[in-house]
């Protein structure tokens, strides 16, 4: 019988759901150290609580909103454990014992039911978001930088029958897609970036008055891209200020006399079109903007970063929050206030807070006096402590 190799299965499936589950397993058993070879005995040791926590981890990690996508995650890991059982005799009773299966399904049901039944069409769906990530990952796992250099050379030399730059454009498009995905940056802002906006030494991108820290993944992609960019500039003997350039050295955005800047978005987001059937990257940025709002980042900051008007941001968030969600949140808020008012502890009863100094005293008369304000002549209760010191009060 063959030995099951988790990393091989992960590569063959190329699924965001399996990738996150594998990440969770390495955190659980190896403190996140993926250099360790995964011991298959761990599959048999996984408890119900640990499997449930893996679902919570997946929802947090990928910012999942829809019930269908969360259910599909459970389906994906169930398929993995069925494969382990049927083909490798690696058994976990949670996936073979009917009572345990039912128990697991019962406990994950409330977690999934908290998510939205249907996803808003104004945002890239969870499934398309994962499909896009899977496509990017698959491309980066298989692309050959040397073949792109060769493609650029052939295009430059106009070799017979070779006037296409498919791989170069696919590769370059990953960068603006990830900038939209991670930072919610607008199309025009990204395509208009200049080379001076990028600081590779300090891993920073300067845009709209912000210094954005770039993660290692995008730095690796940019490192390869800058090699290709330098090669193109040398090949065509050009000087180019724009960060993103086509295979012939021209920018993805051009200015024509009497006309506004005209970006070539068809090429700029080429891989997105291939993977999810649209290059409407605003669906992707809208998703990220809502996540930022939910995390408490203020509207002014998000508006400046993403070049999105404040009222548009509010409309986005309102579109994301369905009416029943808003109603539930309001009622939860008011119910919580009501509960707090009704649950005053016994030691708090029979006391009054002074309106002038805020001190709390018992209601006995020796603690209070009737005070008349000099400004309006009105009478109020004031504690004797602050009443004696305030110049605003006469007796």
Image (cartoon, rainbow, N blue to C red):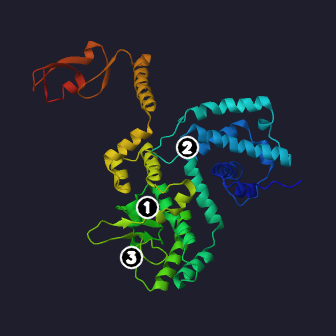
The answer to whether 223 is drawn above or below residue 118 in the figure is below
Residue at image location 60% in from the left, 58% down from the top: 135
- Residue 279, image x and y in percent? 48, 57
Which callout, 2 or 1, points at the residue further toward the start of the chain?
Answer: 2
For mark 2, what is the residue? 64
Answer with mark 1 or mark 3, whichever residue precedes in sequence. Answer: 1
Q: What percent of the width, then of the height, locates residue 242?
A: 40, 73
The local crowd at label 2, few if under 14, some if 14 to 19, many if 20 or more residues have their Cα within 10 Å, is: many
Determine whether, in the image, residue 116 is placed left or right of residue 7: left
Residue contact at pointers 3 and 2, CB within 8 angstroms: no
- The first of marks 3 and 2 along the sequence is 2
Q: For mark 1, does the 10 Å Cα neighbourhood hold few (<14), some (14 to 19), or many (20 or more) residues?
A: some
Residue at 74% from the left image edge and 38% from the top image edge:
47
Q: Disc 2 on helix, strand or loop?
A: loop
Say which quadrant the C terminus sits in. top left
Residue 212 badge: 1
Q: Nearer the viewer, mark 1 or mark 3?
A: 3
Q: Nearer the viewer, residue 300 or 241?
A: 241
Which quadrant of the structure image shows residue 93? top right
From the viewer's perspective, is residue 203 above or below residue 378? below
Residue situated furthest right in the rendering: 1
User: What distance separates the C-alpha of mark 1 from that of mark 3?
Assistant: 20 Å
Q: CA distance from mark 3 to mark 2?
A: 39 Å
Q: For the residue labelled by badge 3, is the local secondary structure a helix, a strand or a loop?
A: loop
The answer to whether 335 is drawn above or below residue 164 in the figure is above
Q: Which residue is more in the foreground, 352 or 136?
A: 136
Q: Secondary structure at mark 1?
A: strand
Residue 241 is marked as: 3
């Amino acid at each position: 019988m063959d030995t099951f190799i988790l990393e091989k299965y992960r590569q063959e499936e190329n699924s965001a759901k399996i990738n996150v589950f594998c990440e969770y397993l390495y955190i659980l058993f190896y403190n996140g150290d993926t250099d360790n070879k995964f011991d298959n005995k761990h599959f048999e040791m996984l408890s119900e609580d640990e499997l449930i926590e893996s679902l919570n981890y997946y929802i947090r990690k990928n910012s999942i909103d829809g019930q269908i996508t969360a259910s599909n995650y459970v389906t994906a890991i169930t398929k993995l454990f069925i494969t382990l059982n049927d083909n490798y005799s690696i058994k976990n009773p949670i996936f073979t014992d009917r009572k345990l299966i039912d128990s697991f399904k019962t406990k994950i049901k409330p977690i999934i039911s908290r998510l939205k039944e249907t996803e808003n069409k104004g945002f890239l769906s969870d499934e398309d978001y994962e499909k896009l990530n899977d496509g990017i990952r698959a491309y980066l796992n298989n692309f050959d930088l040397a073949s792109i250099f060769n493609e650029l050379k052939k295009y430059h030399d106009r070799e017979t029958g070779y006037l296409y730059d498919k791989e170069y454009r696919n590769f370059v498009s990953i960068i603006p897609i990830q900038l939209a995905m991670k930072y919610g940056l607008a199309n025009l802002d990204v395509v208009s970036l200049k080379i001076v906006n990028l600081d590779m030494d300090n891993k920073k991108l300067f845009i709209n008055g912000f210094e954005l820290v770039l993660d290692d993944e995008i730095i690796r992609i940019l490192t390869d891209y800058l090699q290709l960019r330098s090669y193109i500039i040398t090949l065509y003997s050009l000087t180019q200020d724009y960060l993103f350039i086509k295979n012939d050295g021209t920018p993805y955005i051009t200015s024509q006399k009497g006309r506004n800047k005209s970006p070539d978005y068809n090429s700029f987001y080429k891989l997105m079109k291939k993977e999810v059937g649209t290059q409407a990257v605003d669906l992707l940025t809208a998703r990220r903007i809502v996540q930022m709002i939910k995390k408490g980042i203020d509207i002014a900051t998000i508006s400046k970063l993403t070049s999105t008007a404040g009222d548009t941001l509010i409309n986005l968030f309102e579109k994301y929050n369905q009416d029943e969600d808003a109603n539930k949140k309001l009622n939860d808020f008011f119910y919580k206030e009501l509960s707090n008012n009704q649950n005053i502890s016994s030691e708090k009863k029979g006391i009054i807070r002074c309106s002038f100094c805020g001190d709390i005293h018992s209601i006995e008369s020796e603690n209070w006096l009737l005070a008349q304000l000099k400004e309006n002549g009105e009478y109020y209760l004031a504690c004797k402590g602050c009443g004696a010191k305030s110049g605003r009060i006469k007796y």
